[in-house]
Amino acid sequence: MKKETTTMKKSTSKEAKGADSPSLLIDGRIKELSDWRGETLARVRLLIKQADPEVVEEWKWRGVPVWSHAGIICTGETYKSVVKLTFAKGASIEDPAGLFNSSLEGNTRRAIDIRGGEQLNEASFKKLIRSAVAANSAARAQRASPKK
């Protein structure tokens, strides 16, 4: 069992990877899946890093890959039949390509469920990542600005 401190560690894509860094833990999850789910998680991870080279990888809630920049962008959960990418502020992000296909009824989050054999529109996904970063940055700037 991993130590509690492991779940809260952060790493950037440029940082050296320690023995229990989130990046290595995500690598391990991808390897342990050893099927289409691992391949899918690895692919979306690459797309996230391409869309936002400053993304921070985290390992939270005892085993969930999380990508953050000025707040959580999305999580990458794996289930038997889907890889679920849940966007923390998905309800406030424009999705002209209609990638969000799950958790549509909530006021905050939105998710993309990817099933085996499905292809993700990569260009639209990268735009969604950049929009999530922009939403996080705007919210952070608003919190930091002095109130009148």
Image: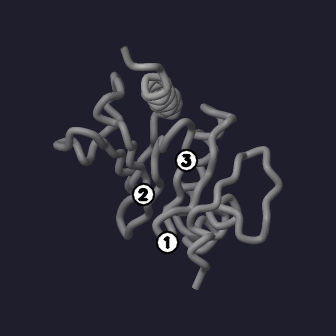
Label 3 environment density (alpha carbons within 10 Å; few <14, some 14–19, many ≥20): many
Q: Position of residue 77 (x, y in %)?
A: 44, 60
Is label 3 or label 2 in front?
A: 3
- Residue at the disc numbered 1: 62
- Tell me where residue 115 appears, x and y as whole percent: 38, 55
Q: Residues within 10 Å of mark 2 (few under 14, many from 20)?
A: many
Q: With 45 as the anchor, is 109 left or right in this view?
A: left
Task: Return the residue found at the far front.
Answer: 148
The residue that disc 3 covers is 67
Q: Give the structural element (helix, strand or loop) at label 2.
A: strand
SS for dot 3: strand
Q: Which mark is residue 121?
A: none
Helix, strand or loop under label 1: loop
> Pointer 2: what residue?
83
Nearer the observer, 23 or 10 = 10
Q: Amino acid at mark 1?
A: Arg
The residue at 77%/71% (across/down) is 19
Residue at (62%, 33%) from the top-left corner? 52
Residue 5 coordinates in the image, percent (x, y): 61, 70
Query: From this viewpoint, which residue is outermost toward the right?
Result: 16
Mark 1–mark 3 Cα distance, whole angstroms, equals 15 Å
Q: Amino acid at mark 3?
A: Trp
